[in-house]
Image (cartoon, rainbow, N blue to C red):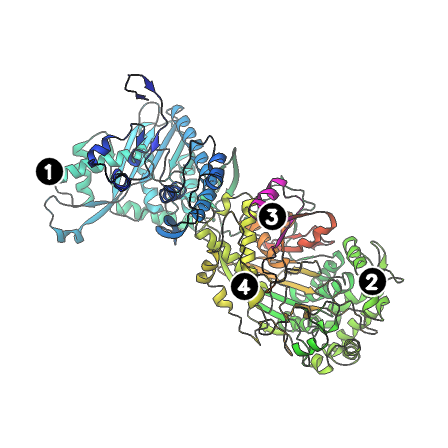
């Protein structure tokens, strides 16, 4: 309230100065060069409702949310103007629509960035429009932050009014370290000066309030110092208030001191030992002007005034003596080193069982339930909580709350011995049969794959390729097998052009798109390298052979896919009836027998790889291909071998001082794209271009935009660099380096698509099978198996009962391109299995999502569902997905926009907001949702009894399920 010149009163809203008075005076002189006004006179002109930043109240804070917006406003001051805005929406819209002048002008601005746990102010340059877009993207985050701190402030004030001698409020903080000096200290003595830490606290009760200032020569500010300080405070409180039963503590959210698992574990011990109800609240504000700041400020000033008067302060004892001499209103007591050591000895043993708590930065309030449990509260529009145990170690927490935000068709499947999860129930039973006979995860995976050729030939078959990741629990090593085939040695780009193929890719139905089928050799190598040795190939193939001979009922989704390819099967070769039922695609529930496929599988079971790559089957393959103008030879088949390769991986932070590692097969597979997208996403967060994902609503427009753009950046590299490493150097390590990923992340705009990216062709389909198998020894197999496009070429070799794939269509027919066709070369491969471990090599999950170029997109989305939003394995698969569907990226279509397909279940509001970012969006419903891929997950669960428990989920977009025992 201010007085006008006529004596009347008027109410103004307080305003905080962005700059210091000195800075504002310099701006004034620059803009008013003809005005002669001193700085002191200028300062006197400051209105009473405009206050300096030093006068901020406790509910204001100096944090990234506030300061980065202030820094942007300072740089934009000359370019953004306008009148008072009635709402945030009005303000953010006006920034772009009305109030910006000279948007193309070049400016610089500063931003605080968190790097390696420390905040640094960095300089950036760009246009006014770019700075405005950045400002606009951060306003909503600020609004949420302001809401949180206001709710906390109300709650804090409410509790203080309700205190009794049984229920008290405690606020604590570490002050900046105090440097001990002498009044007549010479300059060189600066290097000899010692520091002490000061733990400050204030207690509110009905009878009496207490102020504490607890200095210590230990300046680590760690949990052991915190515990020793709390012991001093609580001992005093209980001596004065013997009936105290509830303590509500408040502090900032310093991760190294308060907001971490060891402090949480210690709280449970304190509450149990003292038999009190203990709660700890974390302010969202940073460095606020609270009562504890006032206490330490008073003590420091009193001691410093004594030093200036000639008193000596060379130790903690001197500091305490001077402080007590100056005031008796504050309890000044030393946190002694020997007490800290006792605390350390006591707590280190307890901390061995401290369980990591994911996403501590999201927490606003924890309440001790018992010696081993906390309730964790997060402020949203209402208070919500989740209960956490504080024992053992944990990397991925799955939330088993059944109140899902979308319809979940299935429950999680659990097993204590083994689990098979695939898109066909009968294939799962085949894998389980092998496991019960003494086979391991690798043996069961091959049995499952062979059976999937029988029960889902519209997706996979021995005429195609596969990739394998295998986890050996004994060695904690992940191995990878590349089961993809090479192009014929006689096939060149020139010969394809001579055949009249002018497109950028070999057509799917052209038999020159058939590379050597790699699946059979990969089956045999998987058993040889990773199998148990307890079963013969005949025993492993027997479930598939039995189903092919005796027949099986066709599943619903499989029948639909089969019907779509009916005409292709009839036209591709003279043997189409081998894959049809009375000349028609089988319908759901009809019994389908495949005697010729059974005969082929038996030949392989009896003779091994020679039963496929030599002899009658090989001759039938070559005869069919050459009859259609193809160039494959018997030599191409007989020389084929699968390739054991080192898997590639990337580390990803869970923001709880833990990291996980995601594993993929290396190129020529596109697993590199998934890892790059994960790395780019993490770098975008590190650059503070977005708030932490924990603060972004799942499947909101903001969340989807972040993932979409991360994937587009990854695809733009992957579509060019991923090729056969035997022919082209694929710079895997360089592409996965943090430096390169950070550079790519610089291209991310939080509210607009990047229009200057080139794409490969994310042609998305559901023509692959992915499945996962785990066994009782803790081993796991992540397996993916594909024809590429439905039945592939749909061409069936005579008397063989399987179709030939079309993987060669993925070659780029462009001279000089790394993925250009060459004799004996493997094409870019879309099929990718995946695994997740902790940094110690312990398996956390075995998972994958099939579906062409959807696969890295599915890997990223399902991974985030599990590790960021703590969905259980089934919910992570059920959640609606997006799929980027882009044109081929060549010189003539660079400007064709990518289309983002959104699954039914994503709201209209989100769709409209994505459109405002520049995305071309289409909603997909019904049976067409198969374009979003079909995934399987098996996760290894932690439990207090250290017993093996598997948890599995199977995608509702397929016919399958998970089964185990």
How many residues crowd around disc 4 within 10 Å: few (fewer than 14), some, or many (20 or more)?
A: many
Q: Residue at x 31, y 31 (%)?
A: 50
Secondary structure of the residue carrying tag 1 is loop
Horizontally, residue 79 falls left or right of residue 3, namely right
| Residue 467 in view (yes/no) | yes
Q: Nearer the viewer, residue 791 or 649?
A: 791
Q: Earlier in the sequence, mark 1 or mark 3?
A: 1
Give percent across and percent down for residue 439: 68, 66
Q: Earlier in the sequence, mark 1 or mark 4?
A: 1
Distance from the alpha carbon under mark 1 to that under mark 4: 68 Å
What label does residue 567 carry, if any?
A: 2
Distance from the alpha carbon under mark 1 to that under mark 2: 100 Å
Q: Residue at x 27, y 31 (%)?
A: 46
Up-down relation of residue 255 to residue 480 (above or below): above
**Mark in the foreground, 2 or 3:** 2
Q: Is residue 899 magenta?
A: yes
Distance from the alpha carbon under mark 2 to that under mark 4: 37 Å
Q: Nearer the viewer, residue 907 or 58?
A: 907
**Mark in the foreground, 4 or 3:** 4
**Mark in the foreground, 1 or 4:** 4
> Which residue in the protein does label 4 denote?
717
> Which residue in the protein does label 3 denote?
872
């Amino acid at each position: 309230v201010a007085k006008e010149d006529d004596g009347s009163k008027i109410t103004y809203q307080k305003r905080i100065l962005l700059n210091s008075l000195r800075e504002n005076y310099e701006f004034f002189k620059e803009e008013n060069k003809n005005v002669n006004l001193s700085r002191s006179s200028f300062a006197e002109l400051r209105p009473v409702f405009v206050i300096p930043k030093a006068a901020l109240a406790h509910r204001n804070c100096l944090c990234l949310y506030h300061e980065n917006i202030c820094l942007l406003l300072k740089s934009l001051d000359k370019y953004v103007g306008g009148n008072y805005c009635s709402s945030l929406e009005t303000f953010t819209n006006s920034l772009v629509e009305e109030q910006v002048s000279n948007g193309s002008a070049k400016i610089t601005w500063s931003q605080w960035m968190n790097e390696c746990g420390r905040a640094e102010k960095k300089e950036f340059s760009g246009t006014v429009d770019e700075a405005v877009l950045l400002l606009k993207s951060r306003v909503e985050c600020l609004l949420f932050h302001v809401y949180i701190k206001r709710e906390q402030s109300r709650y804090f004030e409410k509790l203080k009014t309700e205190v009794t001698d049984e229920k008290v409020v405690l606020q604590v903080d570490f002050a900046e370290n105090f440097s001990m000096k002498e009044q007549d200290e010479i300059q060189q003595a600066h290097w000899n000066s010692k520091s002490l830490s000061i733990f400050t606290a204030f207690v509110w009760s009905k009878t009496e309030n207490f102020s504490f200032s607890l200095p210590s020569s230990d300046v680590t500010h760690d949990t052991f110092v915190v515990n020793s300080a709390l012991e001093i405070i609580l001992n005093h409180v209980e001596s004065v208030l013997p009936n105290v039963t509830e303590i509500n503590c408040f502090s900032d959210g310093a991760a190294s001191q308060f907001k971490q698992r060891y402090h949480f574990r210690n709280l449970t011990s304190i509450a149990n030992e003292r038999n009190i109800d203990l709660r700890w609240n974390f302010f969202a504000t940073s460095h606020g002007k609270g009562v504890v700041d006032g206490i330490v400020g008073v003590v420091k000033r009193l001691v410093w005034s004594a030093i200036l008067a000639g008193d000596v302060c060379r130790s903690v004892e001197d500091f305490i003596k001077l402080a007590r001499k100056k005031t008796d209103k504050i309890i000044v007591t030393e946190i002694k080193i020997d007490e800290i050591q006792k605390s350390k000895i006591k707590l280190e043993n307890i901390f061995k069982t401290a369980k990591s708590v994911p996403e501590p930065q999201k927490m606003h309030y924890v309440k001790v339930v018992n010696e081993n449990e906390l309730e964790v509260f997060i402020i949203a529009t209402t208070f919500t909580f989740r209960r956490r145990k504080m024992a053992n170690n944990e990397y991925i927490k799955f939330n088993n709350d059944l109140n899902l935000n979308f319809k979940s068709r299935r429950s999680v499947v659990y097993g204590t011995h083994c689990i098979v999860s695939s898109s066909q129930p009968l294939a799962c039973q085949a894998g389980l049969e092998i496991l019960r006979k003494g086979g391991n995860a690798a043996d069961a995976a091959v049995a499952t794959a062979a059976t999937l050729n029988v029960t889902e030939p519209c997706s996979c078959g021995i005429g195609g390729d596969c990739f394998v990741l295998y986890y050996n629990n004994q060695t904690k090593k992940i191995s990878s097998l590349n089961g993809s085939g090479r192009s014929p040695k006689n096939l060149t780009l020139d010969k394809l052009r001579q055949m009249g193929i002018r497109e950028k890719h070999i057509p799917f139905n052209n038999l020159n798109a058939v590379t050597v089928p790699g699946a059979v050799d990969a089956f045999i190598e998987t058993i040889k390298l990773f199998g148990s040795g307890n079963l013969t190939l005949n025993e492993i193939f027997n479930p598939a052979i039995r189903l092919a001979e005796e027949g099986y009922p066709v599943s619903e989704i499989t029948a639909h896919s089969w019907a779509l390819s009916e005409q292709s099967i009839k036209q591709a070769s003279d043997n189409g009836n081998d894959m049809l039922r009375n000349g028609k695609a089988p319908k759901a529930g009809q019994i389908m027998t495949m005697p010729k496929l059974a005969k082929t599988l038996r030949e392989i079971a009896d003779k091994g790889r020679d039963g496929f790559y030599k002899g009658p089957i090989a001759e039938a393959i070559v005869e069919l291909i050459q009859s259609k103008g193809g160039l494959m030879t018997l030599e191409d088949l007989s020389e084929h071998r699968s390739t054991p390769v080192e898997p590639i991986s990337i580390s990803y932070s869970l923001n709880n001082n833990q990291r996980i590692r995601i594993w993929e097969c290396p190129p020529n597979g596109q697993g590199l794209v998934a890892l790059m997208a994960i790395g780019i996403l993490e770098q975008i967060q590190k650059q503070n271009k977005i708030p932490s994902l924990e603060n972004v609503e799942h499947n909101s427009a903001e969340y989807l935009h972040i993932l979409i753009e991360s994937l587009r950046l990854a695809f733009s590299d992957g579509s060019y660099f991923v090729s056969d490493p035997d022919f082209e150097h694929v710079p895997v390590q360089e592409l996965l380096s943090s430096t390169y990923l950070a550079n790519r992340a610089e291209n991310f705009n939080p509210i607009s698509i990047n229009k200057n990216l080139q794409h490969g062709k994310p042609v998305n389909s559901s023509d692959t099978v992915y499945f996962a198998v785990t066994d009782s020894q803790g081993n796991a197999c992540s397996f993916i198996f594909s024809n590429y496009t439905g039945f592939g070429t749909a061409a069936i070799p005579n008397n063989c009962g399987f179709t030939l794939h079309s993987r060669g269509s993925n070659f780029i027919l462009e001279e000089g391109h790394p993925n250009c066709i060459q004799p004996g070369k493997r094409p870019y491969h879309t099929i990718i299995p995946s695994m997740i471990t902790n940094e110690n090599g312990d398996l956390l999950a075995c998972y994958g999502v099939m579906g062409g170029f959807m696969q890295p997109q599915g890997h990223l989305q399902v991974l985030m569902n599990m590790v960021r939003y703590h969905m259980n394995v089934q919910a992570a698969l059920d959640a609606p997905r997006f799929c980027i569907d882009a044109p081929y990226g060549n010189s003539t279509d660079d400007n064709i926009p990518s289309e983002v397909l959104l699954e039914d279940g994503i709201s209209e509001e989100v769709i409209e907001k994505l459109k405002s970012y520049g995305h071309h969006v289409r909603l997909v419903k019904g049976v067409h949702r198969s374009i979003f891929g079909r995934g399987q997950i098996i996760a290894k669960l932690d439990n207090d009894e250290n017993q093996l428990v598997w948890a599995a989920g199977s995608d509702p977009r397929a016919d399958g399920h998970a089964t185990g025992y």
